[in-house]
Amino acid sequence: MSADKTAIRPRIADGETLILDIRGSLNGACKNTLSRSLDEQMGKHKNVLLNFADLTRMDSEGAILLIVYANELAQKKIGLAACRLVEPFKDVFHLTCLDQAISWFDTEDEALRRRPFPTGVQPVRAFQTYKGPSAPGWAGNVAHIAVGDVPAEAMNINANGRKVTSPVNGFGRLWEKRYRFQIKNSAMEPQKIISLWRKEFPDFWPKGNRLFTSGGAPIVPGATALLNLSVGGLLVLATGIIVIYADDHSFCFSTVRGHMLCGWINFNSFRKNDQTIIQVHPLFRAADPLMELGFRLGAARQEDQFWHRTLRNLAARLGVEGQVEQTNALIDPRLRWGEFGNILHCGAIRSSLHMPLYLLKRIFSSRRKHA
């Protein structure tokens, strides 16, 4: 998390528009200040404009804040827009699909001329490809992931060439969850925890779940991976992810088209009072109608158990004791019927159809090894 100080200064453009000048870093620590600035003016204005002229850094928790507030404002019919993004942060907006949730303009004057700001998901705005250095911690914008050099025994489908998605693109309700493991009276440094977590990440998943990074690469911004997830017995769900952000205190995955979820999963560690906190922080919508139904029928509990076990496994590796606490926040209860077509790319369906071939492949591979 950046040491840059953050200042959020509200000002009123006119009776219809609240402008928030954001100076310094936009991260999870900004939540209370940003909430207070919006809550004090909520209901008084039809538009909110974020002025990023003095933004120096944004991490994945900051991006989560923007999606959460974009959805909350949209439900109140309040338009949200951004202006004066420098090129690296425009690139982040495209990578994360923030540009589909928040209108953006080059200047404040242009933004004010284009009111009222739209609410809800917006068309992708054309932009010139950016080839400069990425914003600190962020991967460069990519439309589709490439995953190569994975083991022959993996179910290698539903990942290579798939489009990068985000919480903006899903069908189901928008959920924000937090799974926290609290280590009491621990002086363990969060940076060391994150370093170990990134290095040994797949080892902490429950048995039967596997992650294959492209070419065996470490978890760094831009790294892509094939996932083989256990869904009971011999059944496997194959899908992919991309690491969109990583720094000394956190890292964040984004799903790709066909994953069960459209969203981000942020992993971080920090000190709070006399405790060290290890946290998994997802923000997501079920990708398609089938997955939304599955989550309502019990898949959500399985997902919760997955991350509870992961955190306990990490704690065992660290040799510490504590407990996992979970919070669930329903950010937006609406279904996105415009995304019904996501079911055509559903990784669960495609993996099920591929299972006979995959099992035969494993059987013959096993026989060759023992011949």
Image (cartoon, rainbow, N blue to C red):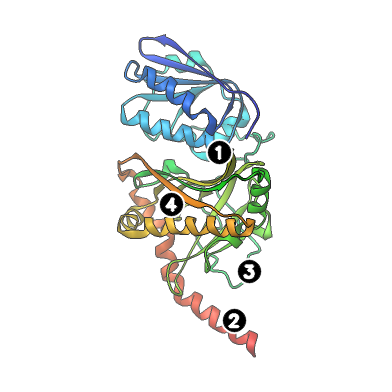
**Residue at horizontal 45 percent and vertical 56 percent from the top:** 258
Q: Secondary structure at mark 1?
A: helix
Q: Please indicate, yes or no, whether residue 213 appears anywhere in the rendered image.
A: no
Name the spot of residue 124 as percent of width and height, x first.
Answer: 46, 35
Which of the 4 image quadrants contains residue 142?
A: top right
**Residue at horizontal 63 percent and vertical 47 percent from the top:** 222
Q: Which residue is mark 2?
A: 365
As drawn, the label of residue 60 is 1
Name the spot of residue 242 as percent of width and height, x first.
Answer: 57, 50
Q: Earlier in the sequence, mark 2 or mark 4?
A: 4
Q: CB of mark 1 within 8 Å of CB of mark 3?
A: no
Alpha-carbon span between mark 2 and mark 1: 41 Å
Residue type, mark 2 in image: Ser
Q: Earlier in the sequence, mark 2 or mark 3?
A: 3
User: Are there few (<14), some (14-19), or many (20+) residues within 10 Å of tag 1?
Assistant: many
Q: Quadrant of the N terminus?
A: top right
Q: Earlier in the sequence, mark 4 or mark 3?
A: 3
Which of the 4 image quadrants contains residue 23?
A: top right
User: Are there few (<14), some (14-19), or many (20+) residues within 10 Å of tag 3?
Assistant: few
Alpha-carbon span between mark 2 and mark 3: 12 Å
Q: Secondary structure at mark 2?
A: helix
Q: Nearer the viewer, mark 2 or mark 4?
A: 4
Q: Nearer the viewer, mark 1 or mark 3?
A: 1
Q: Which residue is mark 3?
A: 151
Left or right for 286, reference 255: left
